[in-house]
Amino acid sequence: MKKIFVLNGPNLNLLGKRQPEIYGYETLADVAANCRKVGEEFSLDCDFRQSNHEGELVDWIHEAREDAAGIIINPGAYSHTSVAIYDALSAFEGPVIEVHISNTHKREAFRHHSYVSLRADGVIAGCGVEGYSLATRRMGGLVK
Ligand code: DHK
């Protein structure tokens, strides 16, 4: 089994409760369970985490340099603001896939730019929480 990190940024702990018309009714626990299930098909051990704190996300990306073969990340609002997360991901050598549940390009202009996309090998947006399954499948092909 190869370990991958699945990292989630601010407010994603409220998944299923906040703005369900945008983010859906499934919870982050549902998403984690599904990632683990899909991961097993590809011999991936999904280490699934969420934080509302930018520095903690940076620390986890540093940890991934030693412990993870790839990173799937939904940085939430930090996608649009965080040079620190972009820099940390740039110091990670494995594949990075960025996931957004909503289609950020269909929303407010400030969501159209993502620092993380400058580093990501793949970007999935607007596929709902299924985006995480798609990203896990793709990761299975990239780290095998
Ligand atoms: C989640 C968020 O919390 C927003 O800040 C992003 C992203 C979009 C999502 O679609 O998963 O702009």
Image (cartoon, rainbow, N blue to C red):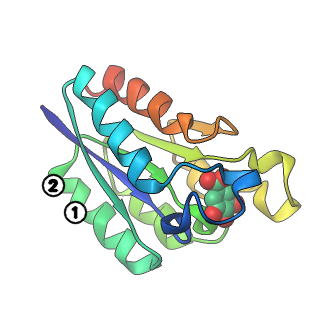
Name the one closer to the observer, 102 or 112.
102
The quarter in which the C terminus is drawn is top left
Q: Which mark is residue 63?
A: 1
Q: Is mark 1 within 8 Å of ligand 1?
A: no
Q: CA distance from mark 1 to mark 2?
A: 6 Å
Q: Residue at x 63, y 67 (%)?
A: 77
Q: Is residue 46 visible?
A: yes
Please state if 68 lies on the left or on the right of 70 as rendered.
left
Image quadrant in which you'd find residue 51: bottom left
Q: Residue at x 54, y 48 (%)?
A: 26
Ligand 1 quadrant in view? bottom right
Mark 2, other Cα within 10 Å: few <14 / some 14–19 / many ≥20: few
Place of residue 78 in the rendered image (x, y in percent of width and height, measured from the top left): 59, 68
Please state if 77 lies on the left or on the right of 22 as rendered.
left
Place of residue 55 in the rendered image (x, y in percent of width and height, measured from the top left): 40, 79
Q: Is mark 2 within 8 Å of ligand 1?
A: no
Q: Tell how many labels.
A: 2
Place of residue 93 in the rendered image (x, y in percent of width and height, measured from the top left): 31, 45
Which element is circle 1 on?
helix
What amino acid type is highlighted by mark number 2?
A: Glu
Q: Which residue is mark 2?
A: 66
Please state if 23 lies on the left or on the right of 14 as rendered.
right
Which residue occupies the extreme left position in the image?
1
Q: Residue at x 61, y 50 (%)?
A: 25
Which element is circle 2 on?
helix
Mark 1, other Cα within 10 Å: few <14 / some 14–19 / many ≥20: few
Place of residue 136 in the rendered image (x, y in percent of width and height, measured from the top left): 39, 32
Q: Are marks 1 and 2 in contact (CB under 8 Å)?
A: yes
